[in-house]
Amino acid sequence: MQDYINIDKSDDCIELEFYIEEDKIMAVGEKIKDIVKEINEFVYMNGADWGILLDFYIEKNAPELIDTYEVDAEAGMYAAVFENSPEGEKAAQAMAEIIISLIENEDKLIDFVSEFKDEIDWD
């Protein structure tokens, strides 16, 4: 697993934590901000903005995951909370793999944002 992703299991839930203040993530976030600034100058790529982007990506590319988690976004972190079950664990792992794939294949993420920037609800 990458330094910017953690899956934390408790009795109540499974939480996927995506640390967006890591240097690599901040650099990707700056590129995304540059792409979308013409349509929304208030996109900062904080936890909420990453949540909006990841939800949109998952709806388009892994819709089976969209109803398996709730978002808990903060300024420096995005978290997806899953139920503590075998299905929840599988969904959290699948989402972690999606995030890692997008960050490690940055061009794929940048191309996606460029293509869909007008459809993503950045509010």
Image (spheres, rainbow, N blue to C red):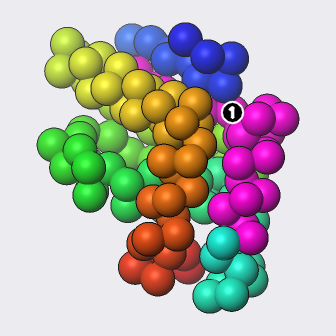
Label 1: element kind: strand
Q: Residue furthest right?
A: 23
Please state, as top left, top right, bottom left or bottom right, where the C terminus lies in the image.
bottom right
Judge whether residue 77 can be spotted in this image.
Answer: yes
Q: Quadrant of residue 96?
A: top left
In the image, residue 109 sits, relative to residue 89, either above or below, namely below
Please state, as top left, top right, bottom left or bottom right, where the N terminus lies in the image.
top right
Name the side, left or right, on which 39 lies relative to 121: right
In the image, residue 17 sits, relative to residue 106, either above or below, namely above
- The residue to which callout 1 is attached is 19
Picture residue at 51% right of the left edge, 15% below the top: 8
Q: Nearer the viewer, residue 41 or 32?
A: 32
Picture residue at 59% right of the left edge, 43% below the top: 106
Picture residue at 48% right of the left edge, 47% below the top: 108
The residue range painted magenta reads 12-34
Q: Residue furthest bottom?
A: 39
Q: Quadrant of residue 90?
A: top left
Relative image position of residue 50 (x, y in whole percent)? 58, 54
Name the side, left or right, on which 76 lies relative to 94: right
